[in-house]
Image (cartoon, grey):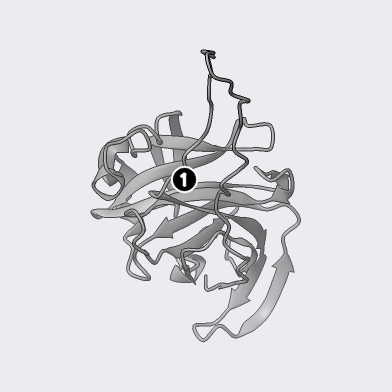
Amino acid sequence: MNEKNIIVLSGILVLIMGYFVLVANATNPTGATDTEGTPETKGEGTAGNVVSEGGNITEVNLSGATQTTHWQGFWGQVIGAITLDDASDNTLYNWSIGTMSGNIYISNKSSGISWSSCTNVSASWCNNIVGTGDDSCTNTFDDSTKTFTIAGNSIPGVNITQTFNAAGTGAWDEGILNCSNEMLFAATIYNNANTFKNGNADFQAIVPVNGTATKTYYFWIELGV
């Protein structure tokens, strides 16, 4: 397969609402640029209160949420084309794509991924990054399994998680894979689907990080699979 079909995109650990501008060939994915949005995190919220009076005992049931420090979220749009290029990325002709489909791949590697070696892997594989708490990899990639097609290879039994749409329903598939002992996350592209922010996007994904430490991820895109 033509290596021009593998799309590489240098990622920075920020929450993205951007556009991935890319060029793709028929079966494999090629280089891309990104526009990054402003990173966001959970606010402190408003504290509840109880009017208190001496001599009284009151039951108070509380609810709240704690922001994870072990996961980074990404989301955004994808713009692409089918192209006929030479080895120097000179374009002889290209064709626009009407409906986006395919996968986005996220890895710590910027090059040299052995796509033909990708296999399913235990959902616990990234527990060494995030730990074994309630927000562990094991408790994240536990929604189901799915078959992914990567560079023409069908990979069944991939453990997936499903990030939420605005209704709080798991709607965006993302799998965890092993590619020659390199961790790879594969997020399915859904054309203009409803996001967690009640807008439209083409992908959502989460990746593991170690507490407050930063980690650089690289983005690859394969269209039309």
At a point 33% along the width and 63% down the height, the residue shown is 113
Give the residue type at disc 1.
Thr
Hey, which residue is sitting farthest front in the picture? 54
Considering only vertical position in the picture, is 205 above or below 110?
above
- 99 vs 156, left or right, is right
189 versus 54 height, above or below: below
Quarter of the image holding residue 217? bottom left
Q: Percent position (x, y) of residue 84? A: 62, 74
Quadrant (top left/top right/bottom left/bottom right) for the N terminus: bottom left
Residue 170 horizontal/vertical position (percent) = 57, 32
Between residues 18 and 100, which one lies in front from this camera angle? 18
Could you tell me which residue is drawn at 54 percent across and 82 percent down?
86
How packed mark 1 is, by other alpha carbons closer than 10 Å (few <14, some 14-19, many 20 or more), is: some
Q: Residue at x 73, y 43 (%)?
A: 198
For this rendering, which residue is in front, 117 or 75?
Answer: 75
Residue for badge 1? 149
Q: Is residue 225 among the parts visible in the rendering?
A: no
Question: What is the number of callouts on the image?
Answer: 1
218 to the left or right of 85: left
Which one is nearer the viewer's eye here, 144 or 97?
144
Q: Is 64 on the left-hand or right-hand side of 46? A: left
